[in-house]
Image: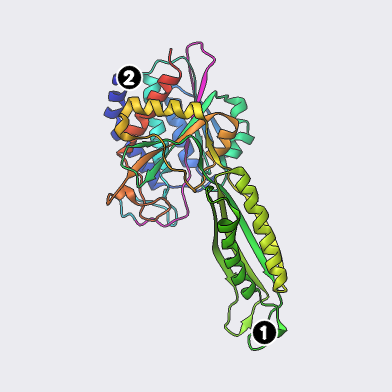
Amino acid sequence: MTYLREAITARVGEFIQLRRDIHRHPELAFEEHRTAALVADKLEGWGYQVHRGLGGTGVVGSLKRGTSARSLGLRADMDALPIQEATGAEWASQTTGLMHACGHDGHTAMLLAAAHELADNAEFDGTLHLIFQPAEEGGGGALQMMKDGLFEQFPCDAIFAMHNMPGVPTGHLVFREGPAMASSDYVTIRLAGTGGHGAMPHRAADPIVAAASLIMALQTVVSRNVDPLQTAVVTVGAIHAGQANNVIPAEARLELSVRALDPEVRKLLESKIKSIVTLQAESFGVQAHIDWKEGYCVLVNSSDQTQFAKQVALDLVGPDRVIQNGPPLTGSEDFAFMLEKVPGSYLLIGNGDGDSAGACMVHNPRYDFNDDNIATGSNYWAQLVRTYLKQ
C-alpha cells in the first residue's frame, strides 16, 4: 500500500489544480453539466466504464478486476450553492452569485485522485462503482439517481461517502455509528386573516399577532414535547407580513426548518407542530394553511461498515488523527437515502480548526475547501477500496 500512497502524493498537485478549476466554475443542482463532463472524461481516459446522465447530471464510473462478485460504491457530490463568493482567492468563482461553499469541488477531486491511482496501480478483486452525484444541496440528487436505477444497474454490497468538516483539525477523520445526521423537513405556514386599518384592529383578524404568538408557542415543541435525551430543532427562519405601519395585512407567512435524529421524533414534531399551528390560529380568529415538505431522512451509519471504515483510517493515519465516536450533527445529507438501501457509512475529514482559513464554516461566502485534504482523502479512499476488495 505504501507505493500507492506515494503515487497519489506525487500527483496531488494535479488534483489540487483540478479542484480549483471546478471551484472557478460552480454549477447549481442538476446543472452540473461542465463538472459532470469533466468527471466522465477523466474516468473514461483512465479505463473506467462510464455511465452519464443518471439522475440528470450524475456520473457513475465502474472498474472491475478479478472474478469476485463483491462490489463497492464510493460517492462524491458535485453541486454548488447560490452564494456570492468573498474569499478573494485566485481560483474564486467566475460566476456571479454562485460558489462552491460546501466543498463539493474538493470531494470530487479527492475521489478522482483515488480513481486515477486505483486504475493505474491498484490490484483488487471485485467491482468498484464511483458515484458522482448531482444536487445534494436540497435537490435530492441521491433520490433521483436511485429512481433512475442506480443500485439496480450498479449493485453495491456497501457504500461510503466523505464530507469535509470545518472546526476539526486538517486531515483528521471522524466516524460515528448509528444516527449521525438529522432529518430535515421544510414547512410553510400561511395565516389568513382579515385585513384592516391599524387604528381599528377590532374590525380585523390580525395574522401578525397570531404569527408572533405562534412563533413563541412553537418553542415549546422541543422543550416540552421531545425527550430531553433526544435531539430536535424547530427554527422559524422567516416571517413575511405587512407593508405599512397603519395597515393590518390579510396574511402572514412563516417558514420553518424542522430537524430530528430519530424517525419517531421526526413524526412527533410533525404532529405537535400541526396541532399547535391549527389551534393557535383558531384562537386568534385566523385560518392556518400548512404546507409540509419532507426533506432528507435521518442518516444512519451501519455498524459493521462504520467499524470497517474506522479501522482503515486507524491503519492509514494512526489513532491520533482519528475521532472514533464523533458527535451527531443536526445538518442533513441526502446520502442518507442511499444508506436506507445499502449498508455503509458517512465520514468526515477535518477542514481546519482554530484560526486557520479552513475553520470557516460551510455555506459561508468566505469558505474554501482545504487543498491539504486531497492527499489524505484520496489515500483514504484508495486504501479502503484495496482493503474491502482485497484479493
Q: Is residue 357 above or below residue 157?
A: below
Residue beneath the point at 56% across and 34% down: 338
Residue 17 location (% of width, % of height): 32, 39
Mark 2 element type: loop
Choose top left, top right, bottom left or bottom right for residue 11: top left
**Residue 233, image x and y in percent?**
54, 54
User: Which residue is the site of mark 2?
Assistant: 1
Residue numbers of the magenta segment: 63-86
The residue lying toward the viewer, choosing from 166 and 277, is: 277
Q: Quadrant of the N terminus?
A: top left
Q: Quadrant of residue 120?
A: top left
Above or below 99: residue 116: above
Q: Which residue is mark 1?
A: 201
Determine the residue positioned at 57% across, 83% down: 245
Front-most of residues 138 and 387: 387
Q: Position of residue 351 (x, y in %)?
A: 34, 43
Mark 2: which amino acid?
Met
- Are the residues flagged by discs 1 and 2 in contact, CB closer than 8 Å? no
Q: Quadrant of the C terminus?
A: top left
Q: Which mark is residue 89?
A: none
Task: Identify which amino acid the numbered label 1 is placed on.
Answer: Pro
